[in-house]
């Protein structure tokens, strides 16, 4: 019996950020309230904070308990919400092998592309088992598009992916190689193995690679197959989704390292650490980790800064050293600026803080790619794998004509992702206009709104005019199947 062990422990990055966000939202709800405003509960829906009327939530809770007491378990499951129902359905699907009612004529291949990310194996596992349960022939490809070009294709069964759920890295092997230079070999192996659909799990290279395959459909009829990308990268820089698989594990790895660094700074007194995170040009890791560890500043490419901003930060740090908290932590995304490098920031803080505080640097590096996936990434990968395979199965039935698969419509090659409150499938050709290919990231980043909270919690004087409050919604009864909701 686990008991109160479940109440203890260090809070995860998600819990730290959620509590910070909910606390801020609760204060804003009080400030915006009028005498006629109903009492509300601040909650999370998808990745959006919303406000729900308190009495509606209480009534729904009572209805759940009454349904349980009356042994109306299906109704109780629905009342608990779409996410709970969806999780329960996925568990039942994957827990035990069930022979398909009939064998399909479809063959699907799964491969990993890009840098390793925690949760890749969880996605592959759930996709393989979902495909098998639907009667498909499922292949896995080793070493990404390069492996597909070399014919490193292997048929897998239900038990071949046993134990993959909690494994970090990529069991299939993954490479950044794009298909452009080896299209003929890829097309030949797609024809040899009779592959009707591709499921590509990976980062920006996976998205870019599938886009190249789609653009080559006019030259190679064999590429007129169904394709789906599951975004999996610590950088969280794939368009079409708010969260990439593996980014939660990376944030927690960076957070744990920064916790240790802060502990060192606390013991030393009057010390500031400059910590460099990964992520390429995308500043998601630096921003979210900064909130989770209470950083004094986080420099990212998407939020341009100049020498005046650095001067303000150093002066703020100097004032902080006059308080009881005599330590500092500054995060820097690895490509946030061409000239204001980690070494430059170290020299600047060391020079301007001379006599007040000293400075040290730490480059976290590839430790952010390693480790076992967090519970969030395990569950997220499992859900995305199931939903992607269900979508592929449905699309294959739609495009199957006269004994063959022919898919050339834009919506036959999509990126699956969590967009605000729901799972969405976005055609890669439509995402092209929303992508900054030079810097390898979406043109618009939802998490930039979190930077306001980062600065406020670091005790900077800022205007709250730009803060977007959560909307007041109503509790509704929803019955969601596995192909909807999350």
Image (cartoon, grey):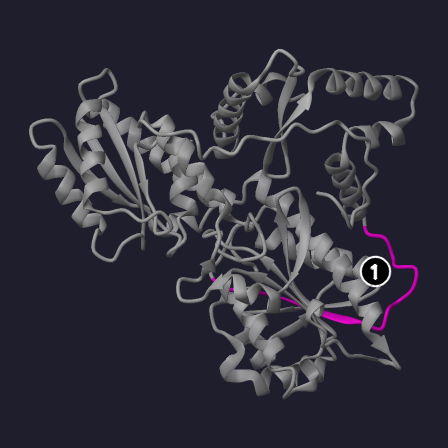
248 displayed left or right of 420 = left
Q: Is residue 237 above or below residue 447?
A: below
Where is residue 163? Give x, y as percent: 64, 49
Residue 57 in percent (x, y) is at 73, 20
| Residue 447 forms part of the magenta stretch | no
In this view, the residue in front, 35 or 189, is 35
Read off the residue under disc 1: 134
Q: Nearer the viewer, residue 316 or 391?
A: 316
Residue that protrudes farthest toward the left in the picture: 355
Residue at image coords 38%, 36% = 290
Q: Is residue 164 visible?
A: no
Picture residue at 64% right of the left edge, 20% below the top:
41
> Magenta residues, as a range?
97-114
Percent x, y of residue 87: 74, 40
Task: Relative to 302, say whether 440 is above or below.
Answer: below
Q: Residue at x 84, y 19 (%)?
A: 63
Element assignment for label 1: loop
Residue 50 left/right relative to 273 = right
Locate the N terminus by quadrant.
Answer: top right
């Amino acid at each position: 019996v686990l008991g109160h062990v479940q109440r203890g422990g260090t809070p995860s990055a998600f819990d730290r950020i959620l509590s910070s966000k909910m606390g801020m939202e609760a204060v804003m709800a009080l400030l915006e309230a009028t005498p006629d405003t109903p009492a509300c509960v601040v909650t999370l829906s998808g990745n959006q904070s919303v406000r729900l009327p308190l009495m509606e939530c209480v009534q729904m809770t009572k209805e759940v308990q009454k349904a349980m007491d009356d042994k109306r378990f299906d109704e109780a499951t629905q009342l608990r919400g779409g996410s709970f129902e969806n999780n329960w359905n996925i568990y039942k699907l994957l827990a035990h092998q069930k022979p398909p009612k009939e064998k399909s004529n479809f063959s699907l291949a799964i491969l990993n592309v890009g840098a390793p990310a925690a949760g890749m194996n969880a996605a592959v596992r759930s996709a393989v088992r979902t495909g098998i349960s639907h009667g498909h022939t499922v292949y896995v490809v080793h070493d990404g598009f390069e492996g597909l070009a070399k014919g490193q294709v292997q048929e897998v069964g239900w038990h071949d992916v046993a134990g993959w759920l909690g494994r970090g890295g990529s069991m299939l092997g993954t490479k950044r190689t794009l298909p452009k230079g080896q299209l003929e070999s890829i097309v030949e192996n797609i024809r040899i193995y009779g592959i009707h659909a591709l499921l590509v799990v990976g980062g920006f290279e996976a998205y870019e690679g599938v886009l190249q395959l789609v653009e080559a459909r006019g030259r190679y009829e064999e590429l007129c197959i169904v394709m789906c990308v599951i975004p999996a990268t610590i950088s969280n820089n794939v368009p079409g989704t708010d969260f990439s698989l593996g980014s939660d594990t990376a944030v927690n790895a960076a957070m744990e390292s920064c916790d240790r660094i802060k502990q060192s700074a606390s013991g030393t007194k009057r010390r500031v650490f400059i910590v460099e995170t990964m992520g390429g040009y995308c500043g998601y890791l630096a921003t979210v980790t900064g909130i989770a560890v209470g950083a004094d500043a986080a420099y990212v490419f998407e939020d341009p800064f100049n020498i005046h901003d650095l001067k303000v930060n150093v002066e703020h740090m100097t004032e902080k050293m006059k308080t009881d908290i005599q330590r500092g932590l500054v995060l820097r995304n690895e490509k946030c600026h061409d000239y204001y490098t980690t070494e430059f920031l170290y020299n600047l803080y060391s020079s301007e803080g001379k006599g007040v505080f000293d400075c040290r640097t730490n480059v976290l590096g590839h430790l952010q790619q390693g480790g076992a996936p967090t519970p969030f990434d395990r569950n997220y990968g499992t859900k995305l794998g199931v939903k992607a395979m269900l979508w592929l199965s449905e699309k294959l039935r739609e495009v199957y004509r006269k004994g063959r698969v022919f898919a050339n419509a834009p919506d036959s090659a999509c990126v699956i992702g969590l967009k605000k409150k729901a799972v969405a499938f976005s055609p890669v050709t439509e995402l092209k206009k929303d992508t900054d290919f030079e810097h390898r990231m979406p043109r618009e980043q939802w998490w930039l709104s979190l930077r306001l909270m980062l600065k406020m919690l670091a005790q900077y004087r800022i205007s709250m005019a730009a803060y977007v409050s959560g909307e007041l919604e109503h509790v509704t009864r929803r019955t969601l199947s596995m192909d909807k909701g999350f």
